[in-house]
Image (cartoon, rainbow, N blue to C red):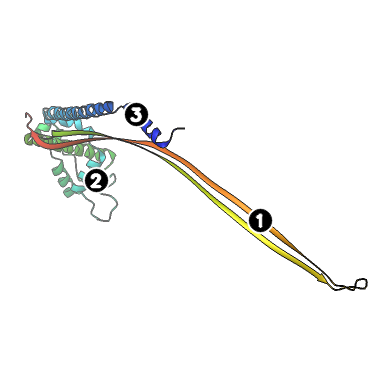
Protein backbone atom coordinates (compact mmCIF):
# COMPACT_ATOMS: atom_id res chain seq x y z
CA UNK A 1 0.00 0.00 0.00
CA UNK A 2 1.52 3.38 -0.98
CA UNK A 3 2.03 6.02 1.69
CA UNK A 4 0.15 9.35 1.69
CA UNK A 5 2.78 11.33 -0.15
CA UNK A 6 3.12 8.90 -3.05
CA UNK A 7 -0.68 8.69 -3.37
CA UNK A 8 -0.91 12.48 -3.59
CA UNK A 9 1.71 12.57 -6.31
CA UNK A 10 -0.23 9.91 -8.21
CA UNK A 11 -3.38 12.05 -8.04
CA UNK A 12 -1.52 15.12 -9.27
CA UNK A 13 -0.39 13.18 -12.32
CA UNK A 14 -4.07 12.89 -13.37
CA UNK A 15 -4.43 16.63 -13.99
CA UNK A 16 -4.91 16.09 -17.73
CA UNK A 17 -8.08 14.11 -17.03
CA UNK A 18 -9.91 17.23 -15.78
CA UNK A 19 -10.39 18.67 -19.26
CA UNK A 20 -9.75 22.26 -18.29
CA UNK A 21 -9.17 23.49 -21.90
CA UNK A 22 -12.55 22.05 -22.91
CA UNK A 23 -14.18 23.76 -19.94
CA UNK A 24 -12.70 27.13 -20.90
CA UNK A 25 -13.68 26.74 -24.55
CA UNK A 26 -17.29 25.93 -23.61
CA UNK A 27 -17.46 28.90 -21.25
CA UNK A 28 -16.40 31.27 -24.02
CA UNK A 29 -18.71 29.69 -26.57
CA UNK A 30 -21.74 29.74 -24.27
CA UNK A 31 -21.07 33.37 -23.35
CA UNK A 32 -21.00 34.53 -26.95
CA UNK A 33 -24.06 32.44 -27.78
CA UNK A 34 -25.93 34.13 -24.93
CA UNK A 35 -24.93 37.58 -26.20
CA UNK A 36 -26.05 36.79 -29.72
CA UNK A 37 -29.35 35.35 -28.49
CA UNK A 38 -30.00 38.42 -26.33
CA UNK A 39 -29.35 40.71 -29.29
CA UNK A 40 -31.70 38.67 -31.48
CA UNK A 41 -34.47 38.90 -28.88
CA UNK A 42 -34.06 42.67 -28.72
CA UNK A 43 -34.17 42.86 -32.52
CA UNK A 44 -37.34 40.76 -32.61
CA UNK A 45 -38.92 43.08 -30.05
CA UNK A 46 -38.04 46.07 -32.21
CA UNK A 47 -39.58 44.41 -35.26
CA UNK A 48 -42.78 43.61 -33.36
CA UNK A 49 -43.01 47.20 -32.19
CA UNK A 50 -42.53 48.63 -35.67
CA UNK A 51 -45.10 46.24 -37.09
CA UNK A 52 -47.59 47.22 -34.38
CA UNK A 53 -47.32 50.97 -34.89
CA UNK A 54 -47.41 50.50 -38.66
CA UNK A 55 -51.04 49.38 -38.32
CA UNK A 56 -53.89 51.83 -38.38
CA UNK A 57 -55.57 52.56 -35.06
CA UNK A 58 -58.72 50.72 -36.16
CA UNK A 59 -56.74 47.63 -37.14
CA UNK A 60 -54.69 47.70 -33.93
CA UNK A 61 -57.81 47.89 -31.76
CA UNK A 62 -59.44 45.08 -33.71
CA UNK A 63 -56.35 42.86 -33.34
CA UNK A 64 -55.62 43.49 -29.66
CA UNK A 65 -58.78 44.36 -27.73
CA UNK A 66 -59.55 40.66 -27.09
CA UNK A 67 -56.14 40.33 -25.40
CA UNK A 68 -56.93 42.92 -22.71
CA UNK A 69 -57.15 41.14 -19.38
CA UNK A 70 -59.91 41.43 -16.80
CA UNK A 71 -57.56 43.07 -14.29
CA UNK A 72 -56.86 46.00 -16.62
CA UNK A 73 -60.58 46.43 -17.34
CA UNK A 74 -61.40 46.36 -13.63
CA UNK A 75 -58.75 48.98 -12.86
CA UNK A 76 -60.20 51.24 -15.56
CA UNK A 77 -63.75 50.96 -14.22
CA UNK A 78 -62.65 51.38 -10.59
CA UNK A 79 -60.88 54.62 -11.54
CA UNK A 80 -63.83 56.01 -13.52
CA UNK A 81 -66.81 54.80 -11.45
CA UNK A 82 -65.78 53.76 -7.94
CA UNK A 83 -68.56 52.67 -5.53
CA UNK A 84 -70.42 55.32 -3.51
CA UNK A 85 -69.59 53.47 -0.28
CA UNK A 86 -65.80 53.35 0.28
CA UNK A 87 -66.30 50.24 2.43
CA UNK A 88 -68.07 48.34 -0.32
CA UNK A 89 -66.67 45.00 -1.43
CA UNK A 90 -67.31 45.97 -5.08
CA UNK A 91 -64.50 48.02 -6.64
CA UNK A 92 -66.85 49.75 -9.11
CA UNK A 93 -70.50 50.61 -9.71
CA UNK A 94 -70.43 48.74 -13.01
CA UNK A 95 -72.01 45.45 -11.98
CA UNK A 96 -74.92 43.34 -13.17
CA UNK A 97 -78.01 44.47 -11.28
CA UNK A 98 -76.75 47.96 -10.46
CA UNK A 99 -78.36 51.05 -11.94
CA UNK A 100 -76.25 53.82 -13.46
CA UNK A 101 -77.32 57.44 -13.02
CA UNK A 102 -77.08 60.12 -15.71
CA UNK A 103 -73.88 61.36 -14.09
CA UNK A 104 -72.44 57.82 -14.04
CA UNK A 105 -73.26 57.25 -17.70
CA UNK A 106 -71.78 60.62 -18.71
CA UNK A 107 -68.56 59.99 -16.79
CA UNK A 108 -68.16 56.50 -18.25
CA UNK A 109 -68.87 57.58 -21.84
CA UNK A 110 -66.40 60.42 -21.48
CA UNK A 111 -63.69 57.95 -20.44
CA UNK A 112 -64.63 55.52 -23.24
CA UNK A 113 -64.59 58.09 -26.03
CA UNK A 114 -62.39 57.12 -29.00
CA UNK A 115 -61.13 59.21 -31.91
CA UNK A 116 -62.94 58.91 -35.23
CA UNK A 117 -60.05 57.03 -36.85
CA UNK A 118 -60.62 54.16 -34.41
CA UNK A 119 -63.59 53.14 -36.58
CA UNK A 120 -65.73 52.07 -33.60
CA UNK A 121 -69.50 52.62 -34.09
CA UNK A 122 -70.85 55.47 -31.97
CA UNK A 123 -67.30 56.33 -30.85
CA UNK A 124 -67.58 53.65 -28.16
CA UNK A 125 -70.44 55.37 -26.29
CA UNK A 126 -72.27 52.42 -24.74
CA UNK A 127 -73.19 53.60 -21.23
CA UNK A 128 -76.73 54.78 -20.39
CA UNK A 129 -78.70 55.68 -17.25
CA UNK A 130 -80.33 52.30 -16.72
CA UNK A 131 -80.11 49.05 -14.86
CA UNK A 132 -77.31 46.80 -16.08
CA UNK A 133 -78.20 43.32 -17.28
CA UNK A 134 -75.64 40.82 -18.50
CA UNK A 135 -75.70 42.00 -22.14
CA UNK A 136 -75.28 45.68 -21.23
CA UNK A 137 -72.55 44.78 -18.76
CA UNK A 138 -70.68 42.79 -21.45
CA UNK A 139 -71.00 45.71 -23.87
CA UNK A 140 -69.35 48.02 -21.35
CA UNK A 141 -66.51 45.54 -20.79
CA UNK A 142 -65.90 45.29 -24.54
CA UNK A 143 -65.90 49.10 -24.84
CA UNK A 144 -63.37 49.38 -21.99
CA UNK A 145 -61.12 46.82 -23.72
CA UNK A 146 -61.14 48.92 -26.89
CA UNK A 147 -60.32 52.06 -24.90
CA UNK A 148 -57.36 50.32 -23.22
CA UNK A 149 -56.17 49.05 -26.62
CA UNK A 150 -56.26 52.64 -27.87
CA UNK A 151 -54.14 53.67 -24.88
CA UNK A 152 -51.59 50.99 -25.73
CA UNK A 153 -51.41 52.21 -29.31
CA UNK A 154 -50.73 55.77 -28.15
CA UNK A 155 -48.03 54.50 -25.80
CA UNK A 156 -46.29 52.53 -28.55
CA UNK A 157 -46.31 55.53 -30.85
CA UNK A 158 -44.72 57.63 -28.13
CA UNK A 159 -42.06 54.98 -27.54
CA UNK A 160 -41.15 55.02 -31.20
CA UNK A 161 -40.71 58.78 -31.08
CA UNK A 162 -38.35 58.58 -28.10
CA UNK A 163 -36.41 55.56 -29.30
CA UNK A 164 -36.06 52.14 -27.68
CA UNK A 165 -33.92 51.49 -24.64
CA UNK A 166 -31.39 48.93 -25.80
CA UNK A 167 -28.96 46.89 -23.70
CA UNK A 168 -25.55 46.40 -25.32
CA UNK A 169 -22.18 45.05 -24.20
CA UNK A 170 -19.46 47.69 -24.35
CA UNK A 171 -16.52 45.73 -22.97
CA UNK A 172 -16.23 42.23 -21.60
CA UNK A 173 -13.90 40.04 -19.58
CA UNK A 174 -13.97 36.26 -19.50
CA UNK A 175 -11.84 34.68 -16.82
CA UNK A 176 -11.26 31.01 -16.07
CA UNK A 177 -9.15 29.65 -13.28
CA UNK A 178 -8.09 26.16 -12.19
CA UNK A 179 -7.05 25.35 -8.65
CA UNK A 180 -5.55 21.87 -8.21
CA UNK A 181 -4.35 20.83 -4.76
CA UNK A 182 -2.96 17.50 -3.59
CA UNK A 183 -2.07 16.58 -0.07
CA UNK A 184 -0.67 13.51 1.67
CA UNK A 185 0.57 12.49 5.09
CA UNK A 186 1.60 9.35 6.96
CA UNK A 187 1.12 9.07 10.70
CA UNK A 188 2.50 6.30 12.93
CA UNK A 189 2.17 6.12 16.70
CA UNK A 190 3.08 3.40 19.19
CA UNK A 191 2.54 3.60 22.97
CA UNK A 192 3.88 0.96 25.39
CA UNK A 193 3.31 0.77 29.17
CA UNK A 194 4.67 -1.69 31.77
CA UNK A 195 3.19 -2.55 35.16
CA UNK A 196 5.05 -4.50 37.88
CA UNK A 197 3.97 -5.29 41.43
CA UNK A 198 5.58 -7.46 44.17
CA UNK A 199 3.62 -8.54 47.25
CA UNK A 200 5.14 -10.02 50.43
CA UNK A 201 3.16 -11.77 53.19
CA UNK A 202 4.46 -13.31 56.40
CA UNK A 203 2.34 -15.66 58.55
CA UNK A 204 3.27 -16.76 62.12
CA UNK A 205 1.53 -19.32 64.38
CA UNK A 206 2.13 -20.20 68.07
CA UNK A 207 0.38 -22.16 70.85
CA UNK A 208 1.04 -23.46 74.38
CA UNK A 209 1.42 -27.07 75.35
CA UNK A 210 -1.54 -29.29 75.93
CA UNK A 211 -2.27 -32.29 77.97
CA UNK A 212 0.13 -34.45 75.98
CA UNK A 213 2.99 -32.00 75.34
CA UNK A 214 4.33 -29.83 78.05
CA UNK A 215 6.17 -27.58 75.62
CA UNK A 216 4.81 -24.80 73.51
CA UNK A 217 5.07 -24.81 69.63
CA UNK A 218 5.73 -21.99 67.07
CA UNK A 219 5.74 -21.87 63.24
CA UNK A 220 6.09 -19.10 60.59
CA UNK A 221 6.00 -18.82 56.77
CA UNK A 222 6.57 -16.13 54.09
CA UNK A 223 4.72 -15.70 50.72
CA UNK A 224 5.80 -13.56 47.72
CA UNK A 225 3.58 -12.63 44.77
CA UNK A 226 4.97 -10.93 41.62
CA UNK A 227 2.72 -9.43 38.83
CA UNK A 228 4.02 -8.13 35.48
CA UNK A 229 1.67 -6.50 32.89
CA UNK A 230 2.80 -5.04 29.55
CA UNK A 231 0.35 -3.18 27.28
CA UNK A 232 0.99 -1.83 23.79
CA UNK A 233 -1.17 0.52 21.72
CA UNK A 234 -0.18 0.99 18.09
CA UNK A 235 -1.84 3.36 15.59
CA UNK A 236 -0.99 3.64 11.91
CA UNK A 237 -2.83 6.16 9.74
CA UNK A 238 -2.16 7.07 6.12
CA UNK A 239 -3.99 10.08 4.66
CA UNK A 240 -3.90 11.23 1.06
CA UNK A 241 -6.24 13.06 -1.25
CA UNK A 242 -6.69 15.73 -3.86
CA UNK A 243 -8.88 18.78 -4.28
CA UNK A 244 -9.77 20.31 -7.64
CA UNK A 245 -11.69 23.55 -8.12
CA UNK A 246 -12.53 24.89 -11.57
CA UNK A 247 -13.59 28.50 -11.35
CA UNK A 248 -15.31 30.31 -14.20
CA UNK A 249 -16.30 33.95 -14.20
CA UNK A 250 -17.83 36.20 -16.85
CA UNK A 251 -17.62 39.92 -16.19
CA UNK A 252 -19.55 42.16 -18.59
CA UNK A 253 -19.76 45.92 -18.49
CA UNK A 254 -23.03 47.31 -19.88
CA UNK A 255 -24.14 50.60 -21.29
CA UNK A 256 -27.47 51.69 -22.73
CA UNK A 257 -28.32 53.85 -25.66
CA UNK A 258 -31.37 54.75 -27.71
CA UNK A 259 -31.88 53.23 -31.11
CA UNK A 260 -33.98 55.53 -33.34
CA UNK A 261 -36.73 53.68 -35.18
CA UNK A 262 -38.55 54.75 -38.32
CA UNK A 263 -41.99 56.21 -37.80
From the top left corner, tell me how far across and down residue 56 is, in percent.
11, 28
The residue labelled by disc 2 is 94
Q: Which of labels 3 and 2 is toward the front?
A: 3
Identify the residue at horizontal 46%, vertical 41% (top origin).
237
Count neighbours of disc 1 (C-alpha within 10 A) and say few if under 14, some if 14 to 19, many if 20 or more: few
Give the distance between the C-alpha atoms of the residues marked 1 and 2, in whole angstroms: 111 Å
From the top left corner, tell me how far across and down residue 222 is, in percent.
73, 62
197 vs 129, nearest the viewer: 197
226 vs 155, nearest the viewer: 226
Count neighbours of disc 3 (C-alpha within 10 A) and say few if under 14, some if 14 to 19, many if 20 or more: few
Quarter residue 58 falls in: top left
Quarter residue 39 falls in: top left
Identify the residue at horizontal 15%, vertical 46% (top origin).
106
Of mark 3 and mark 2, the one earlier in the sequence is 3
**Residue lying farthest to the right in this orientation:** 212
Label disc, if present, on residue 226 of the rendered structure: 1
Of mark 1 and mark 3, the one earlier in the sequence is 3
Q: Is residue 131 left or right of residue 53?
A: right
Label disc, if present, on residue 13 of the rendered structure: 3
Amino acid sequence: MPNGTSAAVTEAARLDEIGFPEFTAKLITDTFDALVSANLRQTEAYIDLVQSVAKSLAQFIEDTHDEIGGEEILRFLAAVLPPDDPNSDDPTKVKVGNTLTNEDAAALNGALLLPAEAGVPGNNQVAAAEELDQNKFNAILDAVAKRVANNRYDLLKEMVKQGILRLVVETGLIETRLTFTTYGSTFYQKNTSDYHRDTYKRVSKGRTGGLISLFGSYSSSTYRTSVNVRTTKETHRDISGSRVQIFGMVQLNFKTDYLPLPT
